[in-house]
């Protein structure tokens, strides 16, 4: 985590140990200049301040860090007032939180498997904030940094190669992440899963030598009488597609198919670190989907934990199958809301590109709230329909529910409709985060996992 120090008095030019990063309105270019004092200054141009919005503020915060790193600056100096633009109508606390989150995210790079360069890795170690800021602003900075740190830890899990992030190792990482916090972690192994009759988890994992795990994390931060919020995260630690094997161009990043599981783990950990007074559960069915002589087959019928049967039309539509058991297990908590998070469909990427996750729910209030929280957090979401009419498309021929639709269109909706069949007795929000699995050009984030939607989930826990 970046060290943030505060200096209320004194000119930036007197702080020679760091590079001053400043925003200049009416300027298009970004320049690096050297003052007569010898201090370097990175001037980030804001061509038209009238067009500045919160989304662009997020990018400016990240750009400040990425530019500092590119100029090998380990200490930077900022004027807090530069970022508190009246047009945005944001409180100082909100600006500080946004800066804290995005400074941390931009300062991240996955280097675990890289040989260090001779000059060493360059990360920003300290940010000096100039100007008088209140204790509330300082706390907001710290809060934002904490959320940014957990988002980066999610990115580490997702980036880790599949051979080093099996279901067993993912379960170990979840337990480690909860260490020292008031979080109870229970890991169910194959025998436990068999006793519960989780036919979805068992079916998908059949082809792998790596045994499945079912990860349960419980944080009881609210009153005993309060019903919990439950997160279910897809934990497919590597997805080959099974016997419906993925083509070469689509299999490379499938160690990230557990990004939803990583996100719910670290959203819950963030909530515990922040002391959010809610009862929160995270459930992660962790499996490998592999092709072998023991793999489940197209045409198989699996008996899920709910008792409903799943007709397997495509072994590469496995995430929804394991999540079906998690959604049924969630009922035991009598939840007031369940949110599932999954890199579920390439069809979601076709629909919205790579700048937003897709949100599905049959509750219009929840849909609006998630869009608002997405804008506030920076984990943007956009809705697609989840009308009951779509349920007809996934009716099975030899089982109750087919794991894909009858036609080639509407794949993201069919995945959401499938999951809705297992959400009995509680409102469900399904987040298809496949579009946001990896960072894209122009975001000022390192290549690899983007860490979605940890920030959104934390905002939800604060507000819902």
Image: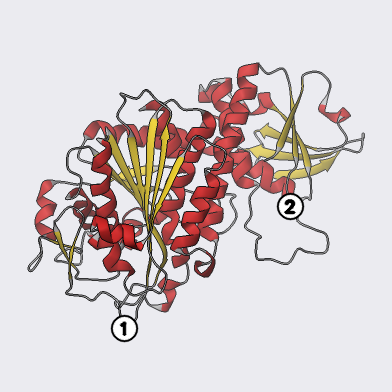
Q: Residues within 10 Å of mark 2 (few under 14, many from 20)?
A: few
Q: Secondary structure at mark 1?
A: loop
Image check: 23 left or right of 35?
A: left
The residue pinned by badge 1 equals 293
Residues 154 and 286: in front is: 286
Query: In the figure, 140 relative to 288: above or below?
Result: above
Q: Quadrant of residue 248?
A: bottom left
Count numbered badges in the picture.
Answer: 2
- Residues 135 and 279: in front is 279
Front position in the image: 80 or 236? 236
Image position of 373 (left or right of 56): left
Q: Residue at x 27, y 32 (%)?
A: 336
Q: Earlier in the sequence, mark 1 or mark 2?
A: 2
Mark 1 and 2 residues: CB-CB less than 8 Å, in contact?
no
Q: Residue at x 33, y 68 (%)?
A: 205
Residue matched to label 2 = 70
Whether residue 345 appears in this view of the structure is: no
Q: Would residue 228 be seen by someone viewing this image from the given angle? A: yes
State the image coordinates of residue 307 (x, y, percent, origin top left): 14, 55
Percent across and percent down for residue 152 are 57, 48
Q: Quadrant of the N terminus?
A: top right
Residue 393 picture quarter:
bottom left
Give the residue drawn at x 56%, y 52%: 442
Q: Where residue 329 sits in the image (x, y, percent)?
A: 26, 47
Q: Secondary structure at mark 2?
A: helix
* Mark sitting on residue 251: none
Residue 18, given in percent of the width and then of the height, sits at 82, 38
């Amino acid at each position: 985590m970046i060290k943030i120090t505060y200096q209320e008095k004194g000119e930036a030019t007197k702080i020679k140990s760091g590079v001053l990063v400043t925003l200049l309105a009416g300027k298009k270019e970004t320049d690096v200049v050297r003052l007569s004092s010898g201090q370097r200054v990175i001037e980030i141009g804001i061509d038209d301040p009238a067009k500045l919005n919160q989304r662009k503020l997020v990018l400016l915060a990240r750009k400040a860090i990425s530019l500092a790193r590119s100029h090998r600056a380990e200490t930077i100096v900022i004027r807090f007032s530069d970022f508190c633009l009246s047009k945005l109508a944001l409180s100082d606390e909100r600006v500080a939180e946004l800066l804290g989150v995005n400074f941390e995210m931009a300062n991240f790079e996955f280097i675990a498997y890289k040989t260090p360069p001779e000059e060493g890795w360059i990360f920003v170690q300290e940010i000096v904030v100039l100007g008088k800021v209140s204790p509330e602003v300082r706390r907001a900075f710290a809060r934002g940094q904490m959320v940014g740190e957990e988002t980066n830890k999610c990115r580490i899990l997702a980036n880790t190669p599949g051979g080093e992030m099996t279901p067993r190792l993912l379960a170990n990482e979840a337990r480690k992440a909860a260490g020292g916090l008031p979080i109870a972690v229970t890991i169910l192994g194959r025998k436990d899963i068999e006793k519960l009759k989780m036919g979805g988890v068992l079916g998908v994992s059949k082809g792998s030598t790596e045994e499945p795990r079912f990860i349960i994390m419980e944080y009881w931060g609210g009153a005993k009488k309060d019903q919990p919020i439950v997160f279910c995260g897809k934990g497919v630690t590597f997805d080959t597609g099974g016997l419906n094997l993925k083509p070469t161009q689509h299999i490379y990043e499938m160690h990230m198919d557990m990004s939803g599981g990583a996100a719910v783990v670290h959203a819950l950990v963030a909530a515990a670190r922040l002391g959010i007074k809610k009862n929160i559960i995270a459930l992660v069915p962790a499996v490998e989907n592999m092709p072998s002589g023991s793999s489940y087959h197209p045409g198989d019928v699996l008996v899920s934990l709910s008792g409903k049967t799943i007709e397997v039309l495509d072994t590469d539509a496995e995430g929804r199958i394991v999540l079906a058991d998690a959604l049924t297990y969630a009922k035991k908590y009598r939840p007031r809301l369940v949110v599932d998070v999954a890199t579920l469909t390439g069809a979601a990427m076709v629909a919205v590109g790579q700048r937003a996750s897709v949100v599905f729910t049959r509750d219009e209030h929840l849909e609006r709230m998630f869009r608002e929280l997405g804008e506030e957090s920076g984990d943007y979401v956009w809705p697609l329909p989840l009308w009951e009419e779509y349920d007809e498309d996934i009716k099975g021929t030899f089982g109750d529910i087919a794991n894909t639709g009858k036609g080639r269109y509407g794949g993201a909706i069919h995945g959401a409709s499938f999951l809705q069949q297992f959400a009995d007795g509680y409102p469900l929000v399904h987040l298809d985060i496949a579009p946001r699995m990896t960072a894209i050009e122009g975001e000022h984030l390192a290549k690899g996992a983007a860490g979605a939607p940890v920030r959104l989930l934390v905002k939800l826990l604060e507000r819902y």
